[in-house]
Image: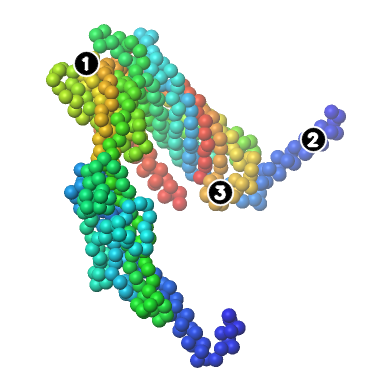
Amino acid sequence: MAHALLTTPPMRLALSIAMAVASGAALGQTSGLTLQIQSTDRLVVGPSQCGANVPVNWAVTSVSQVCTSLRIWVTQGTSCATAPSGSDFSLPDVTVTEMQAGQGTVTLALADLPGLTAADGGAGCGAAVRQEYRVCGTFKIAGGYPASCGASQTDVSASSAPALIYDGEPPPPPTLTALVPLDSSLVAKVTANSTDTITIILQVKEPSDPTSVYTTRDTFSADSGSGTITGLQNGATYSVIAIAEDEAGNQSGPSAPLTGSPVPTSGFFGQYTQDGGAEKGGCSIAGGALLWPAALALAFAGWFAISRRRRS
Amino acid sequence: MRTPQVALAAAAMALAVGARAQEVGTHAGEPAIPPRGQTLELKLGSFTPLIDREAALNGKTPYADTFGTPMLLGEVEIDRYFYQGIGAAGAALSVGYAEKYGRASVLDPTTRLVVGPSEEATALFVVPIRLSGVYRFDWAALHYNVPLVPYVKAGIIYEPWWGTKGGQIEYVNGRRAVGGRWGYGGTAGLSLMLDWFEPRLARDFYADLGVVHTYVFGEYTLAEVNSFGAAGLVLSSRHFMFGVSLDF
């Protein structure tokens, strides 16, 4: 290559260098398309959101050589084709002029999702089904050399297709495996019975009122395996149920109830006090109790610093 | 062993010690031993506060009943020397931390007597803070190639403590399980100078990081932490600790 350049006449050498610089510049201007739904790459929705609209955010880079408008569509499945098919739902095109802004938003009505509308033979939004979608997009840029929007246009597709999941299926009821009695509280141990991301809702029926209903007292991630219901009365018997809620907000039926009674307990200090220990406790570590130790430590640190300075 | 062989062995030993002394730079013509200004100690030990010795408990043993075994105490200490001659004397400040978890007890709702262990955790935390005078007899190590440095410390102690049940500070009859106890204590220990084993590595350690000497050590502490006899928690202890120290 070096030999070839050295033996090339000056005019052709200048032309070669110019072409190399131009192609390098063209390589540096790579076009790209990014899509997100509600600023995330994965959104789970449920029947309670059927009437809602979600924003689809788009962003394009190197928009100076764009030839066509940006097409965005929603397809059932887990991958995108290069163009929408008849069963896909297309959103309004983003024009070349609009693309000059570099980014923007189009709105998707969840009721329009393919396979969920009465018009396309779906079960209708709100049905107890689970469907997975991808939001896809593409536009064309100039190709060839010199670049032009002629016959050799190049497709630019989204670098990744965000997932939109419609989940209308409630999770199975969780299993309440145990109620562990603590002081004024109960620890409920729960198995979710589902591989989905589940939140457990603990509901308690008050013992003092026979007409009372179960009310929510605690929520926790099913991964943690247990939740604590606090503020209970020692010795009273409480009935507890657990309900699973998935990401889409679908709630399971209740688990079989368990009953439990909080018990008074004694920690180390309680045991020490009961055994006759004379310690009164009560002083604040952050308050005056640390005044003298803090003064001594500061005096030491000051002497340490001064003696180091003298030494150096 | 015959006399000439004994003499030969003694001569070889003397040469070896002399050679090692030259390696650590204690002979004329070698670089002088750099003076150390302070010592940093990192240490761990098994620590049992003598809570159960409180007279008011009348022989009852709440610490042993709840926790059973000693705590693991970790401490960091910084010493600063104001005298360096025959050994080194200075002041030391150390801060430690220990925690111990056990199971709370279930009480009978009527009699309030213990009926069994609970699923609930209970814990005791202590933070011993010591301000001490320290003397290290390292003269023999620095001048006669003896790698052992005995030392003593004595000073005052303040020990904040707190107790929890179910992860929260425990309250009993309005008493909050938080406090601090004063005391005093002394420590005796013995350090082994590691430079003696690897003098060249020690020189590199000094050149690169400014560490003059490196030791491993063991020490025994006797601490009376009962606020000078005042009623309350006894956090006194007698315990061994082991660690590493760096002169710099």
Instruction: Please name which of the two marks, 2 or 1, marks the residue nearer to the observer.
Output: 1
Left or right: residue B61 compared with residue A87: right
| Residue shown at 55% from the left, 45% from the top | B212
Binning the other alpha carbons within 10 Å of mark 2 as few (below 14), some (14 to 19) or many (20 upward) gives few
Q: Examine the rendered structure and indicate whether residue A145 appears above or below residue A293.
A: below
Disc 3: host chain: B
The quarter of the picture where residue A242 lies is top left
Q: Which residue is mark 2?
A: B9
Name the amino acid, label 1: Ala
Return the residue nearer the eye: B170 or A284: B170
Where's residue A308, x and y in %?
43, 47
Name the amino acid, label 2: Ala
Callout 3 secondary element: helix
Q: Which residue is mark 1?
A: A236
Q: How is the image coloured?
A: rainbow
Badge 3 or badge 2: first in the primary sequence: 2
The quarter of the picture where residue A236 lies is top left
Taking the image as drawn, is residue A87 in sight?
yes
Name the amino acid, label 3: Tyr
Q: Which residue is mark 3?
A: B206
Quick check: marks 2 and 1 in contact, CB under 8 Å? no
